[in-house]
Amino acid sequence: MQEAMIKRAKELLAEGTVNRVMGWQAGEFAYDITPTVFSSADELDKAFVYNDFCSANVSKYMIKESRKEGKILCFLKPCDSYSFNQLLAEHRIWRDNVYIIGIPSYGKVDVNKVRAKGVTGITGIHTDGPNVVVETIYGSETMVKMDVMEDRCLCCKSKKHMVYDELLGEEGEVLQSNRFEQVEALENMTPEERYEFWRSELSKCIRCNACRNVCPACTCENCVFDNPASGVANKAPSSDFEENMFHIIRAFHVAGRCTDCGECSRVCPQNIPLHLLNRKFIKDINELYGTYQAGEDKDARGPLTNFTVDDCEPSIVHHRRG
Amino acid sequence: MQVEETKEFKPTIVAFCCNWCSYAGADLSGTNRLNYPANVKIIRVPCSCRVNPMFILRAFQRGADGVILCGCHPGDCHYTTGNYYARRRMTLLFSMLDFLGIEKERTRVEWVSAAEGAKFAATMNDFVATITKLGENRRLEDIRCKKQ
Ligand code: SF4
Ligand code: SF4
Ligand code: FES
């Protein structure tokens, strides 16, 4: 895949269709993948990588990049294409300035799961059928891909591209996913258990704001969390309340727009399962207002900017489940 | 040292009332000399949909034990559709609070028109009774804001 991508990118650069390429390069370590803009064939040859560690969703970068001079080439995995489409729906991206190549994704690898198998000194990775081969300074290790796949990929919602100019590889299908199972498990607990669960999770938050910054649905120029008067601005939470407040509001602000890309949980250095908060909103929206997938149809009206006269009353929360 | 234990718990209730219906309803219940507890603090908002989820959380932070939002009946909003949007937002917010294990009885939405002074008083009495039974807000409190 990587070769095909570089080849096509060079062609598009050479013919002048685009003047930059959004892609990935390895950071200090092979698994430490960083989204990067390349502006020449040389740079592509030198640093462009695409492998099982390239899980970063680059659609959010297109907000700024599409406002620059000339077209940019952007590679989108199916789940990234949902985020991109949602940003189009919100008029955040200048579509004419982006050339999209849809690329398939068969799941990305979570380096922590690889490390948990005792593998160190990682220098590279490639897929080999149902397995991945992890190259290390001590030789290579083969493991079953499913065992080291990111959690969010294990319950992938779709392999279909929502928006593209051309496709490399085959187009997939929307999948049946069991992604709400964990939410259900929590719903079935008692309020006390849920409270304990979330206290133990949210109290780990160091307020690095990575979850906010990475989120492709979270794109305001002036964020409420940067406002010192909000009481929850850019500092380590100093009380339980601030932790709850930050997380409730963060999730609420993307409710109805969150495509469930899973980036928030991926980047959290504290491994807080933030996707459970977003998925709770998605599940509620599906159950109360009809199934809705953000990013699927860029002309659809979002569930929170819409209503029907016979929507349920908020008291439904009191009656549903125990 | 003897700690005073018999002090009766008087919950603090914050009621967001839309200017055009519920606030007028509260007024009417006053002019009709209907009783509702003095610990209900009314905050007047232009419309129920003015209420941002942050307001609700902030009220809890600053010491509320229960928060209620009152607006015009669906269909009667002064701005036509404000309360329809508020209804969805509050439903999702309350459900999220419940998901985090915060007692769901602490939040409520009621539609009260300008003519429903009696309903306003009854709603407040009922809500205060519920919260009194539930006790102090512990799960969404901010200890820094507590009176010593
Ligand atoms: S990424 Fe994790 S630690 Fe950082 S602010 Fe978000 S939840 Fe907190
Ligand atoms: S909230 Fe998380 S899952 Fe949802 S769009 Fe943002 S980063 Fe993706
Ligand atoms: S004006 Fe009363 S709810 Fe909108």
Image (cartoon, coloured by chain):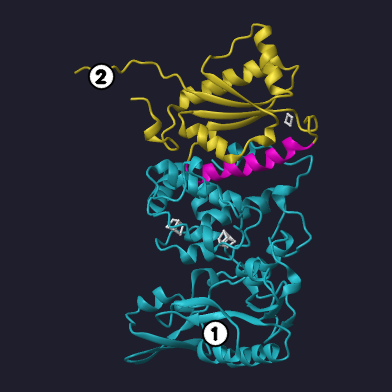
Checking the image for residue A246, the label placed there is none
Chain containing mark 1: A
Picture colour for chain A: cyan
Q: Can residue A295 be seen in this view?
A: no
In the structure shown, which secondary structural element does the residue marked by tag 1 occupy? loop
Q: Is residue A226 above or below residue B63?
A: below
Q: What stretch is highlighted in magenta?
A: B81-101
* Residue A136 rendering spot, x and y as whole percentages: 36, 89
* Residue at the (75%, 79%) spot, across then down: A165
- Depth order, front residue of A262/A185: A262
Image region (quadrant) for ligand 1: bottom left
| Three-letter amino acid code at the position of disc 1 | Tyr
Which residue is identified by label 1?
A50
* Residue at the (47%, 41%) spot, across then down: A231
> Looking at the colours in the rendered structure, which chain would you say is drawn in yellow?
B
Q: What secondary structure predominates along the stretch shown in magenta?
A: helix
Which residue is identified by label 2?
B3
Image quarter hosting the C terminus of chain A = top right
User: A24 left or right of A79?
Assistant: left
**Residue A184 lies within the magenta run:** no
For the residue with label 2, is its CB less than 8 Å from the closest atom of ligand 1?
A: no
